[in-house]
Image (cartoon, rainbow, N blue to C red):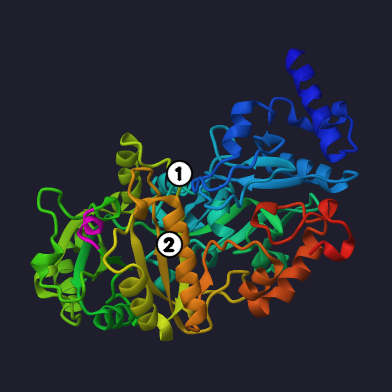
């Protein structure tokens, strides 16, 4: 009884704040008793994300056990007098408050007891998973059947709905495409509170819009993910380059290969100081034998480039992996003395970043601001980017975190999705995954790194490098229109069809909720 009284009091506050037409008892009857939380700890957790760059408190947090509960909440928002927003949150790995909302309810999709467990259909090579399921738990479920998803992100403690709302990329994307290209079917709660199943054959318009749609058209409550037989082990190889043209030429060659005679994963990163090559993302190299840039004879102004590749294999085929890897490496032009290899279980490689996370957490270096910047750079401009950014803006300054760089094939991306990429057949991800530290060094401060991000974007704009932000962060309608380009009209049309009151994912700052605008014409 006490719990209901507290909840009713909190709902009254919600009604006063946002003009909800439901009475407190009516909202309780929707089945949220004990799951719609106003607990300060829940509200505080939902007000923050991995970026730690913004803090926005919601009015309440819903911990749903089913898609129907999500639908009830969104339908209540859609039917309310003045409206309130609803934002889905997974593991909270957003950077700029994309899953936050000051005027409504955060749906906490990930966590113990939230949503049903994964259901593997081994015969049909797919798994049905809750939208808030973490990819690490998807992997654990499918491994029981000797199967695994085809395409990954480097970090597995992200929610399925979160990565599918963006794209989901890693070193397998050149071959299998992003994660959004490896989905058969979705269940989606639209901005009207409708629970809709969609796929290539059923409600295909919504299916393609939601994939890469930044949460604008619906909350993903179920995804059917394509699977493949899981390899047992992999050969993990890193080689170094001092010549950027040779580095990118080899990367582009490797992602052009077809059939079985290719690497299964192709990534790379930029090394602008000796600390970076031995940092958390580069823990591959032994701490007992750290790599020294000077020992490799680099005459490239202190900048090196690391190519990272893997070759999957089974115990039964281990005898041939040496020959296959050697044949591929023979065609590359890396520094001969810079080959570093190791063999490890496939699962250990996929979960490699989490092990580094645990080390950083133990040192208090994980929960710090992360002013990340992720860019898709056209192949034709990658040399200019190297000249102006890696050798110019960054130079040999302290990097404050990994700088990833690797190419992808545009033909592996479904253009019907909402995801945006450059208008070239090959483009690069360049990801500045940096951490801001309050350690007295100006070059590692949040202000310094944020200003450097703006400097990088200004350079691209002034130099005519038409980059596209991945995990985009814009604040004006004009910026979003430019980002989506030719896809904008269709994107806006789908928003008006499936979320006409602009209830969902308002933290992306693409559309202003209609109940907050001064007029209808200002609602988008």
Please tell me whether residue 318 is drawn above or below residue 333 in the rendered image.
above
Query: Residue 275 in magenta?
Result: yes
In the image, 524 versus 208, the foreground residue is: 524
User: What is the C-alpha distance between the residues marked 2 and 1?
Assistant: 15 Å
Judge left or right: residue 101 versus residue 423: right
Give the residue at x 88% y 45%.
82
User: Which image quarter holds the C terminus?
Assistant: bottom right
Give the residue at x 42% y 83%.
381
Judge left or right: residue 92 versus residue 192: left
Residue 290 image position (x, y, % from top left): 13, 54
Please tell me whether residue 382 is drawn above or below residue 40 in the rendered image.
below
| Residue 177 visible within the image | no
Question: Could you tell me which secondary element the residue under label 1 belongs to?
Answer: helix
Q: Earlier in the sequence, mark 2 or mark 1?
A: 1
Give the residue at x 69% y 25%.
34
Judge left or right: residue 59 versus residue 151: right
Please report contact status of discs 2 and 1: CB closer than 8 Å, yes or no: no
Which numbered tag is attached to residue 301?
none
Judge left or right: residue 192 versus residue 467: right
The residue indicated by pointer 2 is 150
The residue indicated by pointer 1 is 137
Residue 264 found in image quarter: bottom left
Question: Could you tell me which secondary element the residue under label 2 belongs to?
Answer: loop
Give the residue at x 15% y 76%.
299
User: Which image quarter holds the N terminus?
Assistant: top right
Please tell me whether residue 196 is drawn above or below residue 453 in the rendered image.
above
Magenta: main secondary structure: helix
Q: Which residues are magenta?
A: 273-278
Residue 429 found in image quarter: bottom left
Residue 494 image position (x, y, % from top left): 75, 67
In the image, 502 versus 451, the foreground residue is: 451
Residue 475 image position (x, y, % from top left): 65, 61
């Amino acid at each position: 009884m006490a719990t209901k009284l507290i909840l009713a009091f909190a709902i009254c506050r919600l009604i006063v704040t946002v003009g909800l037409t439901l009475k407190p008892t009516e909202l309780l009857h929707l089945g949220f008793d004990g799951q719609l939380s106003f607990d300060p700890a829940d509200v505080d957790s939902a007000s923050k994300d991995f970026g730690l760059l913004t803090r926005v408190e919601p009015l309440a947090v819903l911990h749903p056990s089913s898609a129907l509960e999500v639908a009830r909440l969104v339908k209540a928002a859609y039917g309310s007098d003045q409206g309130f927003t609803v934002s889905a949150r997974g593991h909270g790995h957003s950077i700029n408050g994309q899953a936050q909302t000051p005027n409504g309810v955060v749906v906490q999709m990930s966590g113990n007891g939230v949503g049903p467990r994964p259901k593997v259909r081994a015969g049909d090579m797919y798994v049905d998973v809750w939208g808030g399921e973490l990819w690490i738990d998807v992997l654990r479920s499918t491994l029981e059947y000797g199967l695994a998803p085809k395409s990954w992100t480097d970090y597995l403690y992200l929610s399925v709905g979160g990565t599918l709302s963006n794209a989901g990329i890693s070193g397998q994307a050149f071959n299998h495409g992003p994660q959004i290209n490896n989905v058969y079917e979705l269940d989606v709660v639209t901005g009207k509170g409708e629970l809709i199943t969609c796929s290539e054959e059923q409600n295909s318009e919504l299916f393609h819009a939601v994939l890469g749609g930044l949460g604008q058209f619906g909350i993903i409550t179920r995804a059917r993910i394509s699977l493949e037989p899981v390899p047992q082990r992999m050969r993990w190889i890193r080689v170094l380059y001092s010549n950027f043209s040779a580095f990118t030429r080899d990367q582009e060659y490797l992602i052009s290969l077809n059939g079985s005679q290719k690497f299964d994963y192709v990534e790379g990163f930029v090394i602008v100081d000796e600390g970076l090559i031995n940092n958390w993302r580069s823990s591959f190299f032994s701490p007992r034998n750290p790599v020294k840039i000077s020992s490799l004879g680099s005459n490239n102004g202190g900048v090196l480039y690391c190519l990272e590749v893997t070759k999957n294999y089974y115990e039964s085929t281990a005898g041939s992996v040496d020959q296959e890897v050697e044949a591929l490496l023979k065609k590359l032009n890396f520094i001969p003395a810079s080959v570093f290899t190791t063999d490890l279980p496939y699962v250990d490689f996929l979960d490699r970043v989490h092990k580094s996370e645990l080390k950083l957490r133990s040192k208090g270096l994980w929960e710090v601001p992360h002013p990340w910047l992720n860019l898709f750079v056209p192949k034709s401009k990658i040399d200019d980017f190297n000249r102006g950014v890696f050798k110019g803006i960054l130079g040999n300054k302290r990097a404050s975190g990994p700088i990833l760089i690797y190419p992808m094939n545009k033909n592996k991306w479904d253009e019907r999705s909402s995801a945006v990429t450059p208008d070239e057949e090959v483009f690069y991800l360049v990801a500045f995954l940096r951490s801001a530290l309050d350690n007295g060094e100006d070059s590692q401060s949040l202000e310094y790194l944020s200003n450097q991000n703006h400097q990088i974007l200004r350079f691209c704009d002034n130099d005519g490098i038409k980059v596209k932000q991945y995990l985009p962060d814009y604040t004006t309608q004009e910026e979003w229109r430019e980002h989506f380009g030719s896809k904008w009209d269709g994107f806006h049309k789908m928003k008006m069809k499936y979320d006409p009151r602009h209830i969902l994912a308002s933290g992306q700052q693409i559309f202003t909720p209609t109940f907050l605008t001064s007029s209808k014409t200002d609602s988008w």
